[in-house]
Image: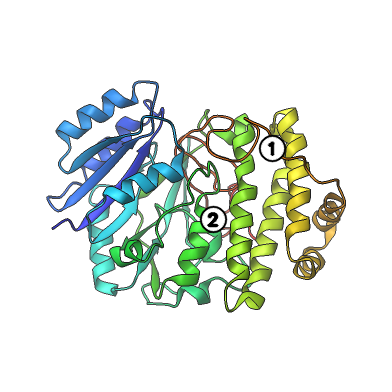
């Protein structure tokens, strides 16, 4: 029986993949499997993965014939997974030796649907600990209770799929798959759905994932059309949360977070290509008009200051034209990597983002 399945998408990360693969070897166990999903890499990554599939115990190589993006690559791995527990890693991050054995032991001890963990953020030679925003550690909690309050950073603002471990019953219930084709912010609808519909979770202080930031291929630096998928991702959060029985309580958090992410993007609009910057403004204006207007008015009143003024002005802009070929947010438009590196605020071939508990928060750590 497979105890743990680890889904690891790769796309053009030949510089970083050796560290990732070496750390998987240091976590290998006879009842672990590592699902290496090559998302149609065009550099030296496929050769590295072929060697790893031969040399790393439990490694299984899965190839995409076309580049599909991180969300779909993760889904491919989930569809092949056989483990009692599941987790994720990105092809440019790495692990401490023996981390997965400790994570499985903690999951079995607590017996809940999923665990969330802290992680180490790495930028060059600088490292910092990023804490999951769950004050109670080592206690089984109700995931819905961790969504609120609206004005604080909460568990839904810490969306990294790789910062945790998940029992197979969540996969069987359809709670672990990602929205097909999202090229950034794919983990935002995912984490909201997990917290709305799972029955139990816990947070622990186990450190073992090293999350690499500041990579040259980051969309945060490139600023292309793929970043605009955050609009589609948060539209999904709003739509699904509006259907929840507790929508009146939860929607203010979803709307306020969406507004904060839009504000972040507009506030750093100079990093975008000119045409993408224009589309960002127009699509953000449309997003603001689609939100529940009463809830939005309350959110803007609570935010106050320059951010609220900017968002009110943006809401009055003309609607965006329908996206044309190669400029929309659907799969295949504008090219793709394996997805989000800054979870709703940027992406690179890899994944992820962090809580506002850390100093100098990452761009994706935009919460209320």
Label 2 packing within 10 angstroms: few (<14), some (14-19), many (20+): many
Q: Which of 319/204 is in front?
A: 319
In the rendered structure, the answer to whether residue 134 lies left or right of residue 293 reads left
Point out the frontmost of discs 2 and 1.
Answer: 1
Quadrant (top left, top right, bottom left, bottom right) of the N terminus: bottom left
In the rendered structure, the answer to whether residue 266 lies left or right of residue 334 reads right
Could you tell me residue 3's position as x and y percent? 19, 58
The residues bearing labels 2 and 1 have C-alpha atoms spaced at a distance of: 22 Å
In the rendered structure, the answer to whether residue 361 lies left or right of residue 64 reads right
Give SS at disc 1: loop
Could you tell me residue 69's position as x and y percent? 46, 38
Residue under label 2: 188
Q: Which of 176/347 is in front?
A: 176
Image point 37% across, 77% down: which residue? 140
Q: Which of 250/123 is in front?
A: 250
Compared with 207, 76 (above or below) is above
Residue 346 picture quarter: top right
Whichever of labels 2 and 1 marks the residue nearer the N terminus, that label is 2
Q: Is residue 20 visible?
A: yes
Give SS at disc 2: helix
**Colour basis:** rainbow
Could you tell me residue 220's position as x and y percent? 60, 36
How many numbered discs sit on the rendered protein?
Answer: 2
Residue under label 1: 323
Residue 111 picture quarter: bottom left
Q: Is residue 365 visible?
A: no
Compared with 157, 74 (above or below) is above
Image point 54% across, 57% down: which residue? 355
Label 1 packing within 10 angstroms: few (<14), some (14-19), many (20+): few
């Amino acid at each position: 029986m497979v105890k743990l399945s680890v889904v690891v998408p790769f796309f053009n990360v030949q510089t970083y993949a050796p560290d990732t693969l070496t750390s998987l070897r240091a976590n290998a166990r006879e009842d672990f499997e590592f699902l290496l999903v090559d998302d149609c890499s065009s550099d030296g990554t496929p050769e590295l993965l072929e060697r790893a599939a031969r040399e790393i115990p439990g490694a299984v190589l899965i190839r995409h014939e076309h580049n599909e993006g991180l969300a779909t690559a993760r889904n491919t791995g989930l569809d092949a997974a056989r483990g009692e527990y599941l987790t994720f890693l990105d092809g440019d991050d790495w692990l401490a030796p023996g981390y997965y054995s400790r994570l499985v032991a903690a999951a079995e001890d607590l017996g809940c649907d999923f665990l969330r963990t802290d992680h180490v953020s790495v930028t060059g030679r600088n490292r910092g600990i990023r804490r999951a925003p769950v004050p109670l550690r080592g206690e089984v909690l109700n995931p819905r209770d961790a969504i609120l309050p609206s004005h604080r950073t909460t568990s839904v603002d810490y969306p990294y799929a790789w910062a945790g471990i998940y029992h197979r019953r969540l996969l069987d219930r359809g709670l672990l798959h990602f929205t097909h084709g999202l090229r950034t912010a794919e983990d935002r609808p995912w984490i909201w759905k997990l917290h709305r519909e799972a029955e139990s979770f816990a947070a622990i202080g186990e450190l073992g994932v090293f999350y690499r930031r500041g990579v040259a291929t980051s969309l945060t630096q490139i600023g292309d059309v793929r970043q605009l998928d955050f609009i589609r991702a948060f539209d999904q959060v709003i739509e699904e949360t509006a259907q929840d029985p507790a929508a009146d309580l939860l929607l203010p958090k979803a709307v306020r977070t969406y507004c904060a992410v839009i504000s972040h993007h507009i506030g750093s609009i100079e990093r975008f290509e000119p045409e993408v910057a224009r589309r960002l403004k127009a699509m953000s204006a449309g997003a603001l008009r689609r939100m529940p207007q009463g809830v939005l008015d309350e959110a803007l009143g609570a935010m106050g200051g320059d951010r609220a003024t900017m968002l009110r002005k943006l809401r009055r802009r003309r609607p965006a034209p329908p996206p044309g070929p190669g400029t929309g947010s659907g799969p295949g438009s504008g090219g793709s990597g394996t997805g989000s590196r800054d979870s709703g605020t940027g992406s690179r071939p890899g994944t992820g983002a962090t809580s506002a508990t850390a100093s100098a928060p990452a761009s994706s750590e935009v919460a209320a």
